[in-house]
Image (cartoon, grey):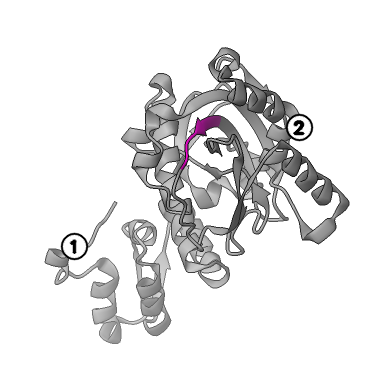
Amino acid sequence: MLVLSAAAASVKTPIQIAASFSSRFSPLSFSVSPLYSLCLNNRYNSTRAQFATTPLSVSIPARQSRCFSAMTTADETMDAVQRKLMFDDECILVDENDHVVGHENKYNCHLMENIESKNLLHRAFSVFLFNSKYELLLQQRSATKVTFPLVWTNTCCSHPLYRESELIEEKYLGARNAAQRKLLDELGIPAEDVPVDQFLPVGRMLYKAPSDGKWGEHELDYLLFIVRDVKVNPNPDEVADIRYVNQDQLRELLRKADAGEEGLKLSPWFRLVVDNFLYKLWDHVQKGTLEEVADMETIHKLT
């Protein structure tokens, strides 16, 4: 990947070199292999401005062209914070047995076109955080989220990234490291409030769910439970609202969502966990026997 540091600011890129000669050699036709690196390095806006003012004819390989086109669409329709996450975050691609087969950016992983045609499946996690009264912390996703905006869901839902610390398979440490990172990013929960060794992986599920005509999820999801009293300071770019609920309050929330009351909607992965696992696991949380029923051998295919 091409990275332009401050020390190298005086070095001209191929685009800049071409632009400097365009007045004498226009129209100019050439092949630009570093363009994709610039695209992935958040240099798109300056590159697009140069294209708008310089009469260049650029030959770009098909995959790089698709990236450039996708960036154009994303630039016009997405919140800036969410756009950055979509292209910076590299999700871990897995097969249905949870073996790593590659990586891809978050944007491509969540396009329903790719999910359906390429069967892209990525690793994810869902955190269920309970306080000392055994109430479950829920969040409402922000209105700017690309997938499932403003739906209510479990404490935190995201992806381990394709990086060394989050690829660790032993004791599912990669997923637990990612959970700690995202609890801080989304809810402002300090790392010391949620030590990685306090997350208990209790199960895995595989599911597919469309968000709208363009976006969706296809995830192999790790369910991580933790009991901690924490300080919460939600990030408005990620979270619209939070609430703690007991079991009866959650049942009432589900009833309202099913009845269409108050515009309440639940995320599909949260609903799958509620309908298949949550209340039984919650009882074991309260009894202190959760480790006895944890099952990370089975991958529950709920699609």
Q: Which mark is residue 255?
A: none
* Relative depth, front residue between 32 and 285: 285
Mark 1 crowd level (few <14, some 14–19, many ≥20, 10 Å Cα): few
Q: Secondary structure at mark 2?
A: helix
Q: Which mark is residue 275?
A: 2
Residue at the far front in the pictured view: 133
Name the residue located 47 percent from the left edge and 59 percent from the top edge.
235
Q: Nearer the viewer, mark 2 or mark 1?
A: 2
Residue at the far bottom in the pictured view: 23
* Res. 197 visible in picture: yes
Is tag 2's residue or tag 1's residue first in the polypeptide sequence? Answer: 1
Residue linked to disc 1: 5
Name the residue located 12 percent from the left edge and 65 percent from the top edge.
7
The range drawn in magenta is 223-229
Residue 225 magenta-drawn?
yes
Residue at the far right in the pictured view: 259
Residue 294 magenta-drawn?
no
The amino acid type of the residue labelled 2 equals Asp
The amino acid type of the residue labelled 1 equals Ser
In-image side of 21 versus 200 (left or right): left
The C terminus is located in which quarter?
top right
Q: Is residue 156 shown above or below 284?
A: below
In-image side of 75 versus 41 (left or right): right
Image coordinates of residue 227 in percent, x first then y, are: 51, 32
Image coordinates of residue 240 in percent, x first then y, are: 59, 61
Main secondary structure found in the magenta portion: strand
Image coordinates of residue 301 in percent, x first then y, are: 69, 25
Label 2 close to label 1 by CB (< 8 Å): no
* Res. 167 visible in picture: no
* Relative depth, front residue between 194 and 272: 194
Name the residue located 39 percent from the left edge and 20 percent from the top edge.
170
* Relative depth, front residue between 270 and 209: 270
